[in-house]
Image (tube, grey):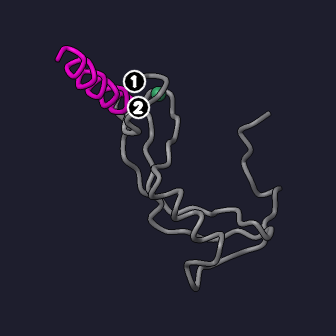
Amino acid sequence: MSEEQVIAKEEETTDDIYSELDEDRCPFCHIDLDPKTEDQWLRSYDGRELWLTDVKSLVCSKCGVQVYPEETLNYFEEARTGGIPNLKSREYIPDTYDDDDE
Ligand SMILES: [Zn+2]
């Protein structure tokens, strides 16, 4: 009898862990992220860039981290693999980038 109760409690705990990893929250600041929709260039596998519209992401107003939900990652993947027809594209030219990395 008591064993069943223990199992039920473990399941609840697992659910709580997942909800804490909610992608609507900043993993660093643990505050809610602000939804953002923007158009942006995506680097494709063949050395070109694809113009994507309505790219959804979540941005932390404190540290600026940008999180892409799974929906957006799927969108990127679909674009890269040619799943979205008639995307505007251009040649990838590294010099045009503002590179934040040093
Ligand atoms: Zn943050």
Q: Is residue 77 left or right of residue 30?
A: right
Snapshot quadrant of residue 46: bottom right
Q: Residues within 10 Å of mark 2 (few under 14, many from 20)?
A: few
Circle 2: residue type: Leu
Answer whether labels 1 and 2 touch (C-beta < 8 Å).
no
Give residue 54's position: percent from left, percent from top.
44, 65
Quarter that holds the C terminus: top right
Mark identifier at residue 30: 1
Say what secondary structure mark 1 lies in. Answer: loop
Circle 1: residue type: His
Give residue 90's position: percent from left, percent from top.
72, 74
Mark identifier at residue 8: none
Foreground label between 1 and 2: 2
Residue sitting nearer the eye, 63 or 25: 25
Q: Is residue 88 above or below residue 51?
A: below
Between the residue at mark 1 and the residue at mark 2, the CA separation in whole angstroms equals: 10 Å
Q: Is residue 73 above or below residue 32?
A: below
Outermost residue, left side:
1
The image shows a total of numbered marks equal to 2
Mark identifier at residue 21: 2
Q: Which numbered disc flags the more N-terminal residue, 1 or 2? A: 2
Is 58 magenta? The answer is no
Ligand 1 near label 1 (Cβ, under 8 Å)? Answer: yes
Q: Is residue 34 left or right of residue 88?
A: left
Q: Residue at x 51, y 41 (%)?
A: 66
The stretch in magenta equals 1-21
Q: Is residue 99 left or right of residue 5?
A: right
Say what secondary structure mark 2 lies in. Answer: loop
Quarter that holds the N terminus: top left
Is 10 magenta? The answer is yes
Outermost residue, bottom side:
86
Q: Is residue 3 above or below residue 24?
A: above
